[in-house]
Image (spheres, rainbow, N blue to C red):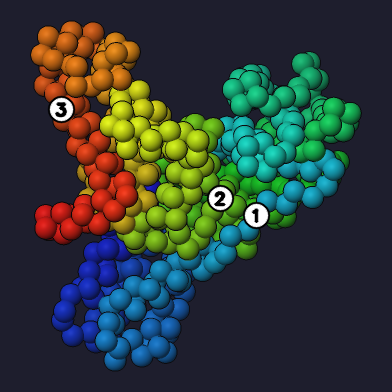
Amino acid sequence: MFQNLSDKLDKALHVLKGHGKITEVNVAETLKEVRRALINADVNFKIAKEFTTKVKDKALGENVLTTLNPSQLLVKIVKDELANLMGGETVGVNLSGNPTVILMSGLQGSGKTTFSGKLAHYLTKKKDKNVLLVGCDVYRPAAINQLQVVGEQIGVEVYAEEGNQDPVEISLNAIKHAKASGKNTVIIDTAGRLAVDQEMMSEISNIYNAVSPQETLFVVDSMTGQDAVNTAKAFNDLLNFDGVVLTKLDGDTRGGAALSIKSVVNKPIKFIGTGEKMEALDVFYPDRMADRILGMGDVVSLVERAQEQYDEEEARKIHKKIAKNQFGFDDFLSQIQQIKKMGNMKDLMGMIPGAGKAMKDVDIDDDAFKGIEAIIHSMTPGERTEPKSINASRKKRIAKGSGTSIQEVNALMKQFNQMSKMMKMMQGGGGRKMMQMMKGMQ
């Protein structure tokens, strides 16, 4: 996520992170490089120039050059201004109305249908809403089929009218159906085109006027950069939408859309999509995103994701097993499943301060646990419960059954034993002892 921009900003600010003297000249030179980094990320030149001017004015106004840590203060100013550029504060979705009607807008291929499913999943699981998805892309049968597949996957009803080519009528009928069936939230997935055209704009305008949505969201592919910003402006001029959704942030995103869109349309980014899974949806926090762009990680979001998958009862069972030296491979497998539910592995690494930069050239596959899972599934129930019972002949059988090598089985056994010891140390007062050991390793 924004890896190229992060690298360029890091290089631009690197000169100020050393111990050399900080002067007004090298601050100006640094900000010139920051501006280049933003333009390279497809941020509008005018916006990039205004950004660096604000940073410079604020830096000189706070007497950065005479402070004890001028480089740190300048980085903080850059971070704060990045957050302001992206909206400054988090804005939630409007859920008033009975039912609440949420209208999706955007070009074809932007991810509207997938996001509609993600939003339905989010509102169902986290906001306790009873959601109805509505298929109004009457020109692309695959879109309605896709929505129905998504609806079945997340357990949400999908309303569609086969043969009806009037999206306004479908929308109104869907709202009636929602009221009759006790649904309190309606998400309308509309048609898109490959480019902005009059027919599409007229159609979505007609739907908007007919259903009077409480929330209109513009869904945009973040990989399209400045083109996304221009499209957003065209839609906003017509619909005056309430917020922006950036999809495909797990891809090779330059960052221009995220950094520019608020300045151009003056509407907040409300959600970001970070993968194909229905759980891969995050509320947009400008300050946290600024941290990630500057390589500072996002520990708060990482902890929040972990807490979402955290099962207190399961945790109590695990603690008891660790205390009694009964932690086995079934428990290990359960922990892996929880980690996988947290999202894209490379995205998770980017949330750890410093890890994103360290792992930037490492290809972290989402199937990174596949080999481990295969090895564990090749064990007998008794071997999973009693890992110490796994001798050389059993390792040979497990390796053959899992399609791996004995060396890989040995490596997993070693990792499992190390993790078991670490978890044992974290019980009671052992955490202090472990911290001392870690300090000794530095």
Asked if residue 119 shows in the view, the reply is: no
Identify which residue, 425 or 250, lies in the foreground: 425
Q: What amino acid is found at the position of numbered circle 2 in the picture?
A: Val
Identify which residue, 203 or 28, lies in the foreground: 28
How far across and how far down the image is residue 311, in percent?
A: 50, 37
Q: What amino acid is found at the position of numbered circle 3 in the picture?
A: Ala
The disc placed on residue 283 is: 2
Residue under the point 10% across and 14% down: 392
Q: What amino acid is found at the position of numbered circle 1 in the picture?
A: Gly
Q: CA distance from mark 1 to mark 2?
A: 8 Å
Residue under the point 67% across and 43% down: 127
Whichever of labels 1 and 2 marks the residue nearer the N terminus, that label is 1
Pointer 1: what residue?
92
Q: CA distance from mark 1 to mark 3?
A: 46 Å
Pointer 3: what residue?
411
How far across and how far down the image is residue 64, in percent?
A: 33, 86
Identify which residue, 141 or 173, lies in the foreground: 173
From the viewer's perspective, is residue 169 above or below residue 128?
A: above
Q: CA distance from mark 3 to mark 2?
A: 38 Å
From the viewer's perspective, is residue 8 above or below residue 161?
A: below
Whichever of labels 3 and 2 marks the residue nearer the N terminus, that label is 2
